[in-house]
């Protein structure tokens, strides 16, 4: 599964990211992953097929590692150097770790976040469905917090 994620990540980074920034702008690009996660996990919760769940997870991870990560880094282009390093350090160390801890605490990660937790036995499918449906409100919250605003610019432009 990791090979598929790596290949798709490379493809999206090389082919899609620049076009998404050009066509959708920074705000529109930020909305892509939450919309896909909402649709994908909602569909997987209604139709829990192993192939569908695996495909949704591969596309979600590839999009996260390429488009979403690049878009998040582009948000810092318009800030001063000092603010950029302070904010990025706070976000990367504090907020990302708190988010990971919250997922672990909630028990929604599955079997300790291993990549192969989609290899399910028949008695685990109910729990998998609960995890897929839990992704829907998480994606909704992500979407609600991703305001499609370009801060007065049509594209991310570096600050002088």
Image (spheres, rainbow, N blue to C red):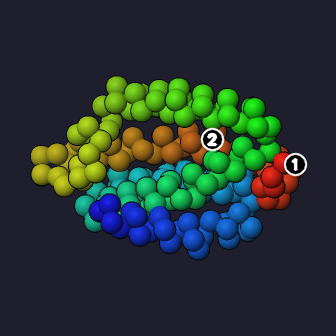
Position of residue 119 relative to residue 90, above or below, is below
Please state which of the two labelled residues, at mark 2 or mark 1, is closer to the viewer: 1
Q: Position of residue 121 (x, y in %)?
A: 12, 51
In the rendered image, which residue does mark 1 sit on? Answer: 160
Please report the residue visible at 28 percent of the width from the left and 51 percent of the height from the top: 115
Front one among 72 and 46: 72
Front one among 38 and 18: 18
In the rendered image, which residue does mark 2 sit on? Answer: 144
- The quadrant where residue 51 appears: bottom left
Please report the residue visible at 50 percent of the width from the left and 72 percent of the height from the top: 11
User: For mark 1, does the 10 Å Cα neighbourhood hold few (<14), some (14 to 19), or many (20 or more) residues?
Assistant: few
Indicate which disc, 2 or 1, sits on the residue closer to the N terminus.
Answer: 2
Front one among 120 and 153: 153
Badge 1 marks a residue whose secondary structure is: loop
Position of residue 84 relative to residue 8, above or below, is above
Please report the residue visible at 75 percent of the width from the left and 32 percent of the height from the top: 82
User: Mark 2 to mark 1: distance in Å?
Assistant: 31 Å
Q: Position of residue 83 (x, y in %)?
A: 75, 32
Please report the residue visible at 50 percent of the width from the left and 54 percent of the height from the top: 64
Residue 39 seen from this side? no
Quarter holding the N terminus is bottom left
């Amino acid at each position: 599964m990791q090979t598929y994620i790596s290949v798709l990540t490379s493809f999206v980074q090389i082919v899609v990211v620049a076009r998404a920034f050009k066509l959708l702008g920074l705000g529109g690009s930020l909305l892509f992953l939450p919309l896909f996660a909402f649709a994908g996990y909602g569909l997987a919760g209604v139709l829990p097929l192993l192939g569908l769940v695996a495909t949704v997870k591969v596309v979600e991870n590839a999009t996260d590692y390429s488009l979403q990560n690049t878009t998040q880094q582009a948000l810092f282009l318009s800030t001063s150097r000092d603010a950029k390093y302070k904010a990025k350090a706070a976000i990367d160390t504090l907020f990302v770790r708190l988010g990971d801890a919250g997922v672990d605490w909630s028990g929604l990660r599955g079997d300790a976040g291993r990549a192969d937790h989609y290899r399910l036995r028949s008695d685990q499918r109910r729990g998998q469905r609960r995890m897929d449906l839990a992704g829907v409100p998480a994606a909704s919250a992500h979407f609600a917090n991703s305001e499609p605003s370009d801060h007065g610019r049509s594209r991310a432009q570096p600050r002088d």
